[in-house]
Amino acid sequence: MDFNRNQFFFLGVFILLLGIQVRVVDTYVLSPEVTKFLAERSGTTVASASDSPGAFLAANAPSNSLVRKSFQPPEWLGWCLMSVGAVLILHSLAMPRPT
């Protein structure tokens, strides 16, 4: 299946906006369900909230709550996504209009 001009443009805008979001947000905190899912898939153990150094902050949390995994994307990832998005947008504008 070949992509047409509109699909290239949409993909470029999507990737450009994703790159802007990665540049603006410093840390992504995953939900306990996703943290548990990743721990099961990678074969690591999941610590409970009472095992963490900030256990006093989780005093109101249920005893079976999980520590949430955080993800800090590297700085270059946002720039890379914005560059790829811009190239796709420019490529779509250089393509002939669909007939």
Image (cartoon, grey):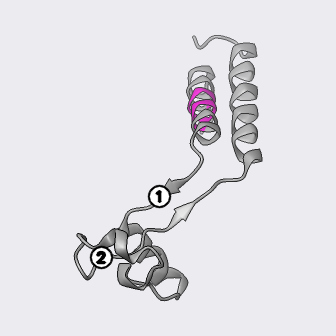
Q: Quadrant of the C terminus?
A: top right
Task: Assess whether residue 13 is covered by the magenta stretch.
Answer: yes
Q: Secondary structure at mark 1?
A: strand
Kindly identify the residue that appears in the image at 30 percent across and 76 percent down: 65
Image coordinates of residue 55 in percent, x first then y, are 38, 77
Residue type at numbered disc 2 = Ser
Query: Looking at the image, is 86 positioned above or below residue 52?
Result: above
Tell me: 93 left or right of 3: right
Which numbered dot is residue 29? Answer: 1
Nearer-N-terminus badge (2/1): 1
Tell me: 48 left or right of 10: left
Task: Assess whether residue 63 is covered by the magenta stretch.
Answer: no
Tell me: 80 left or right of 30: right
The one nearer the camera, 26 or 43, is 26
Q: Main secondary structure of the magenta part?
A: helix
Circle 2 residue = 65
Residue type at numbered disc 1 = Val
Image coordinates of residue 90 in percent, x first then y, are 74, 19
Span highlighted in magenta in the image: 12-18
Query: Looking at the image, is 39 positioned above or below residue 92?
Result: below
Q: Quadrant of the N terminus?
A: top right
Image coordinates of residue 45 in percent, x first then y, are 48, 89
Kindly identify the residue that appears in the image at 41 percent across and 74 percent down: 67
Residue most extreme to the front: 56
The one nearer the camera, 39 or 6, is 39
